[in-house]
Image (cartoon, coloured by chain):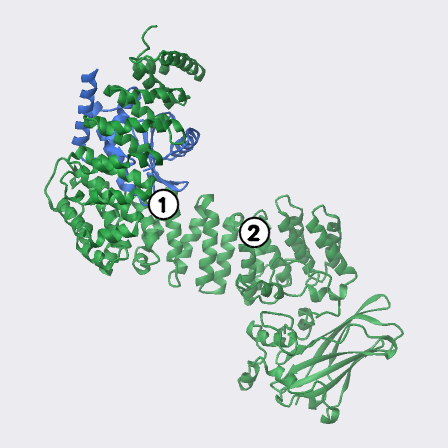
Amino acid sequence: MQFMLLFSRQGKLRLQKWYVPLSDKEKKKITRELVQTVLARKPKMCSFLEWRDLKIVYKRYASLYFCCAIEDQDNELITLEIIHRYVELLDKYFGSVCELDIIFNFEKAYFILDEFLLGGEVQETSKKNVLKAIEQADLLQEKIE
Amino acid sequence: MPAPIRLRELIRTIRTARTQAEEREMIQKECAAIRSSFREEDNTYRCRNVAKLLYMHMLGYPAHFGQLECLKLIASQKFTDKRIGYLGAMLLLDERQDVHLLMTNCIKNDLNHSTQYVQGLALCTLGCMGSSEMCRDLAGEVEKLLKTSNSYLRKKAALCAVHVIRKVPELMEMFLPATKNLLNEKNHGVLHTSVVLLTEMCERSPDMLAHFRKNEKLVPQLVRILKNLIMSGYSPEHDVSGISDPFLQVRILRLLRILGRNDDDSSEAMNDILAQVATNTETSKNVGNAILYETVLTIMDIKSESGLRVLAINILGRFLLNNDKNIRYVALTSLLKTVQTDHNAVQRHRSTIVDCLKDLDVSIKRRAMELSFALVNGNNIRGMMKELLYFLDSCEPEFKADCASGIFLAAEKYAPSKRWHIDTIMRVLTTAGSYVRDDAVPNLIQLITNSVEMHAYTVQRLYKAILGDYSQQPLVQVAAWCIGEYGDLLISGQCEEEEPIQVTEDEVLDILESVLISNMSTSVTRGYALTAIMKLSTRFTCTVNRIKKVVSIYGSSIDVELQQRAVEYNALFKKYDHMRSALLERMPVMEKVTTNGPTEIVQTNGETEPAPLETKPPPSGPQPTSQANDLLDLLGGNDITPVIPTAPTSKPASAGGELLDLLGDINLTGAPAAAPAPASVPQISQPPFLLDGLSSQPLFNDIATGIPSITAYSKNGLKIEFTFERSHTNPSVTVITIQASNSTELDMTDFVFQAAVPKTFQLQLLSPSSSVVPAFNTGTITQVIKVLNPQKQQLRMRIKLTYNHKGSAMQDLAEVNNFPPQSWQ
């Protein structure tokens, strides 16, 4: 995976994770273009589109779009599962997650993502283990504080 | 200084802003506060401030002044600080800035921290955005952690190693020892990341690949793991909709693909498990299909046995019928990759693929279109073309150009009949005429010339098409060209294929002139139209004056191209009128030329952009000593062979001069063969026979052969005599030498002699000695005609003479009937 973006129906960015080195300007440009492209898609269309030389996999959950850019040899269908797993993790952590949770706790959303993916690849396939790690880290945070 | 506001507080406040300006104001105020707080080196609230900065950064505001603060947070001992610090580093720092290198030491320390979660942070950050320099410095630490027994760290180290290898491929070697026991792990996280690491290594280095195949026996290990996953019972920890750890399954299948590629042994070792996965995986949910998809990709890429391949394609076929459009999309993509190698298997799913042309999704439509073109063959062309034409009609504009090109290609390859081919082209031109590519126009024109018997039908249909609408440029260009070429057929109402329409010359000129004038016509199209109008001057009889007028008007056109053409055509009317009919005569059938032969194109007049034959040809050059069609028509209509000696095609000139070769080509280019009589067929089909006549005999035989010469023509001071000789080698050949003499007191210049013979004969005109018949009989023009008369019929000939005399253009037609019997019996 090269990057993952979360954005609202109005095109507001809620999370951006980049696994390739790009300048701030380039990231902004890509984000703007991609958000525009995905928001223009009709509901009946499939979740995949070709964009530049990448494959884009996106899925909408309530008011949030989850959008991943993968490479040619990556499996689109399993990427959908990856997105779904991330949403499940957020859901378990926040308890029925909604967009506001991610807005107000964006740093937590990042921490969870960083326990699930590393360098663009899945690091842990067990939901339980990811959540356990987050829990422990949160405890650590409170302990020292 | 009051405590900086909390993150949540800030977020709430900013969200209350009603306008962009209001938001900006709030942000600026807060940034100022944060900046002064940073200046004070406040440790307590640094974390909070950086977090706020990161939020504002996400909104799109600059946050670079927080970069150093992130580094300070990373260096802090507090876990909270480190967490935000590393997050900030990943969001704000990038490897182009030298600042990021300051992180290296901190990361190194944290990689050796006593708390695994701190180590985890360091590994994550390094694996996410570590630069090459950082990777080089820290690879050793990563390698160490790869060997730890702590699975939480091991899995992260594996992915960190993947990143290191991607950044600095030379470091791959150092991770090799650590990979030894990776697959013995029980922990799925470690297994998954290990497979990713192994995949990365095998993809990058053929040596590694060979090593893992042979020495480590990776394939059996992977097969074993995969088998366990499938066979083992329900495992709640890794279950997704009844499937055990699909992420791991997919990665294993992908690694197997790399290992099995181009390797028979490996491929064989994985054959069974692939078949098992392919048949046993649950297909009701996306997750099962994801695994099947990966399985199909692997089966198609390794050296699998044919049964397995068919199984894979059938899975794809089933995918095509799935309600889920994502699955259909993926199926079409995969089929496109395999259609070349497993063509027959994919053909079986053709109707489903064609149905996908009607899908609402643009990506699916595109793939279905590409796949459809790949599946067209001689057997299904009619049915497929119907679907494709319908698709062309209804698809989005972005497809039309590709679709049109694809249709032309398919039609050319598999057209069941010429009529069908022309109809298909017509359909494309009228449906998507403006999307047709530029290079299609010359190809189509060439195609049309080759379908000789369809000319009348074609020009009629094209005429009708542009009558209503002449905005589609490629359509108009082809139509204009055809009308220019075959306008005579159009007005004569000769169409056999369909009801001929009644069109007058004026009506035809009307439409061409409309094209010329129209704002919608491009410069190129106008050029076509003007040339077409000009060509009609030799095909139409009543409207020549009108044509002359049009042509002269455009002599002052602003468009330089049009102006040049008009000026040259004008010249044709005035000075070179005697050449006009020859220059503008019907195009010969064009040989299909490959793109490697530029010289051929030049010779065939095959530049389909019908540029005016530059009026530089001096009459003494290799003249188009040809038979004008109108001449032939006068000799009795359908009987006459349009002999085309001036179709110089690709044959190189032989010893006898270039024109001699042309006769050979005449037979090849399909001009209706002269003699239907079977008896003499063998001789007719030998191109060189006439050459024999020439090469084995001196040109001027002695009169002692005894054939009397005749005066073929004598009028207005111009006398033409024929002398005969018979070929020794071929009794059907008569060589006639004409001599033209001029008894008047003024020269006859630009003299052109043309001849036509009945259908059962063949005729070849060689170059004349000159084009001037000098006055007072002081000299003659000689020219050789060779006549092939296999049926030994009575020789008849009609001749046409054009020349300039006493300042005016002269033209005359005459029939020569007084051939001595010895010349043809």
- Relative to B821, is B331 on the left or the right? left
Q: Is residue A131 above or below residue A45?
A: above
On the question of residue B290 being in view, the answer is no
List the residue tagged with mark 2: B474
Q: Quadrant of residue B449?
A: bottom right
Q: Secondary structure at mark 1?
A: helix
Choose between B175 and B651: the one closer to the eye.
B175
Q: Secondary structure at mark 2?
A: helix
Colour of chain A as rendered: blue
From the top left corner, tell me how far across and down residue B586 is, in percent. 64, 65
Image point (30%, 17%), residue name: B47
Q: Quadrant of residue A85?
A: top left
From the top left corner, tell me how far across and down residue B310 is, in percent. 25, 57
Q: Chain of mark 2?
A: B
Type of residue at label 1?
Ile
- Quadrant where the N terminus of chain A sits is top left
Instruction: Give the green chain's letter.
Output: B
- Quadrant where the C terminus of chain A sits is top left
From mark 2 to mark 1, how far is it between C-alphas? 29 Å
Type of residue at label 2?
Pro
Q: Is residue B323 above or below residue B819?
A: above
On the question of residue B142 being in view, the answer is yes
From the top left corner, tell me how far across and down residue B2 is, in percent. 33, 6
Q: Quadrant of residue B532?
A: bottom right
Mark linked to residue B364: 1
Give the mark, 2 or 1, whose residue is nearer the N terminus: 1
- Relative to B776, is A38 on the left or the right? left
Image point (16%, 34%), residue name: B150
Choose between B591 and B32: the one closer to the eye.
B32
Image point (52%, 50%), residue name: B436
Task: Rate crowding at label 2 as few (under 14), some (14 to 19) or many (20 or more) other CA atoms within 10 Å.
Answer: many
